[in-house]
Image (cartoon, rainbow, N blue to C red):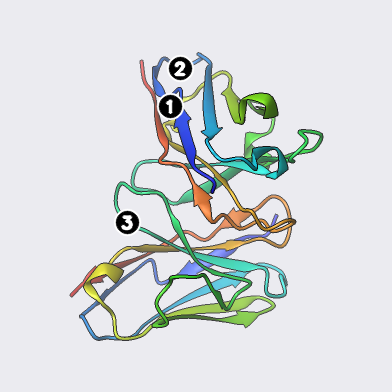
Amino acid sequence: EVQLVESGGGSVQPGGSLRLSCEDSGFTFSSLAMNWVRQAPGKGLEWISQISASGGSTFYADSMRGRFIISRENSKNTVYLTINNLKVEDTAVYYCATTVVVTANFFDYWGQGTLVTVSS
Amino acid sequence: DIQMTQSPSSVSASVGDTVSITCRASQGISTWLAWYQQKPGKAPKLLISAASSLQSGVPSRFSGSGSGTDFTLIITNLQPEDFASYFCQQINSFPLTFGGGTKVQIK
């Protein structure tokens, strides 16, 4: 069973950096492609990035490429999202999400989300 | 990038009503579409994958249809627990993209 728990959110000033973590307490993490999705307050869902099971391939939303970096440590069952040069508009709840269906890109497992607030 | 246009952005309905939500893709995506339900303060929940495949445990009053560019989520016999926001997502190609969402409110 996949169980995702995010951490690392908090309040940060514009221009700062943050690394979010998402740990899977299940036993299949190393076979799962992992994603990050965010949701600004009162807004819709925005897909950020995906990393393949091995970590060898990564994909990004065009608007996220550059400041956002996805990575993973399969030995720790953890995927990370590093956000650099944070902007006020990055304020959002950040979710990690995945599916156990190989090659599918819908998300049937989600974490509870971690809130990032960017403010001076 | 494939743009997903969802409508309406909000709808008011009563218990027992039927609600229809549409999602249009800016280019053909076959049936590579998913629908999610989200309640305030909670993570989204996958309802339907592959445009019409109901996830295990999802009530049969939810149904999805469509292919190519036009898709529909229908909720029949609306129940109190169905008042929530709904999002479509194209899963055809990267970057993955979501529709803007539809909030189903109590009339």
Residue position marked by numbered label 3 in the rendering: B39
Q: Under tag 3, what secondary structure?
A: loop
| Above or below B10: residue A4 | above
Q: Which residue is drawn at 45% across and 17% down?
A: A14
Q: Position of residue A107 (x, y in %)?
A: 57, 54
Chain at tag 1: A
**Relative to A34, is B77 on the left or the right?**
left
Please state, as top left, top right, bottom left or bottom right, where the C terminus of chain B lies in the image.
Answer: bottom left
Task: Say whether mark 2 and mark 1 are on the same chain.
Answer: yes
How many numbered marks have been drawn onto this rendered protein structure? 3
- Marks 1 and 2, how far apart in space? 6 Å
Q: Position of residue A82 (x, y in %)?
A: 59, 23
- The crowd level at tag 1 (other Cα within 10 Å; few <14, some 14-19, many 20+) is some
Q: Which residue is drawn at 52% across and 25% down?
A: A20
Earlier residue among tags 1 and 2? 2
Q: Which of B58 and B9 is in front in this view?
A: B58
Q: Under tag 1, what secondary structure?
A: helix
| Above or below A52: residue B103 | below
Q: Position of residue A117 (x, y in %)?
A: 38, 26
Kindly identify the amino acid type of the residue bearing the numbered disc 3. Answer: Lys
Q: Which of A64 and A111 is in front in this view?
A: A111
Residue position marked by numbered label 1 in the rendering: A88
Do the residues under discs 1 and 3 have CB atoms within 8 angstroms?
Answer: no
- Marks 3 and 2, how far apart in space? 30 Å
Q: Which of A63 and B91 is in front in this view?
A: B91
Residue position marked by numbered label 2 in the rendering: A14
Is label 1 or label 3 in front? 3
